[in-house]
Image (cartoon, rainbow, N blue to C red):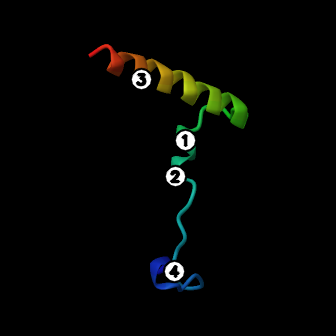
Amino acid sequence: MYRLGNLENGELEIGQVSVLIHNIKPAGEIVKQMMREFEKRKAELSSL
């Protein structure tokens, strides 16, 4: 098996999560989105 290092007689399963990918975004867009979400949550926490 793969976890034992035997790729010739074992199996290598990859790609199962590819169904969860709906679009590909540029890295800059992802970082901006993360920062917007962070700022939103930070504001929510500071109002507690």
Identified by mark 1, the residue type is Val
Q: Earlier in the sequence, mark 3 or mark 2?
A: 2
Residue 14 in the image: above or below residue 8 = above
Of mark 4 and mark 1, the one earlier in the sequence is: 4
Q: Which residue is mark 2?
A: 16
Element assignment for label 1: helix
Distance from the alpha carbon under mark 3 to that under mark 2: 34 Å
Q: Which residue is mark 3?
A: 42
| Residue 10 disc label | 4
Please give the name of the residue rendered at 69% of the width and 32% of the height, measured from the top-left corner: 25
Q: Nearer the viewer, residue 22 or 41?
A: 41
Residue 9 percent location from the top left of the image: 54, 85
Query: Which of disc 4 and disc 3 is earlier in sequence?
Result: 4
Q: Secondary structure at mark 4?
A: loop
Q: Residue at x 57, y 46 (%)?
A: 18
Q: Tell me the CA gap for discs 3 and 4.
A: 47 Å
Inspect the image, locate mark 2, and give the three-letter code of the amino acid beneath it.
Gln
Rendered residue at 63%/32% (across/down) = 30
Q: CA distance from mark 1 to mark 3?
A: 32 Å
Residue 14 lies in what quarter of the image? Answer: bottom right
Q: Nearer the viewer, mark 3 or mark 4?
A: 3
Q: Residue 19: which disc?
A: 1
How far apart are the two marked residues, 4 and 2, measured between alpha carbons? 17 Å
Residue plotted at (46% across, 18% down)? 40
Find the distance from the CA under tag 4 to the CA under tag 1: 24 Å
Q: Badges 1 and 2: C-beta atoms under 8 Å apart?
A: yes
User: Mark 1 and mark 4 in contact (Cβ < 8 Å)?
Assistant: no
Query: Contact (CB < 8 A) between labels 1 and 3?
Result: no
The disc, 4 or 2, on the residue closer to the chain's N-terminal end is 4
Label 2: how many Cα within 10 Å (few below 14, some 14–19, many 20+): few
Mark 4 and mark 2 in contact? Answer it, CB < 8 Å: no
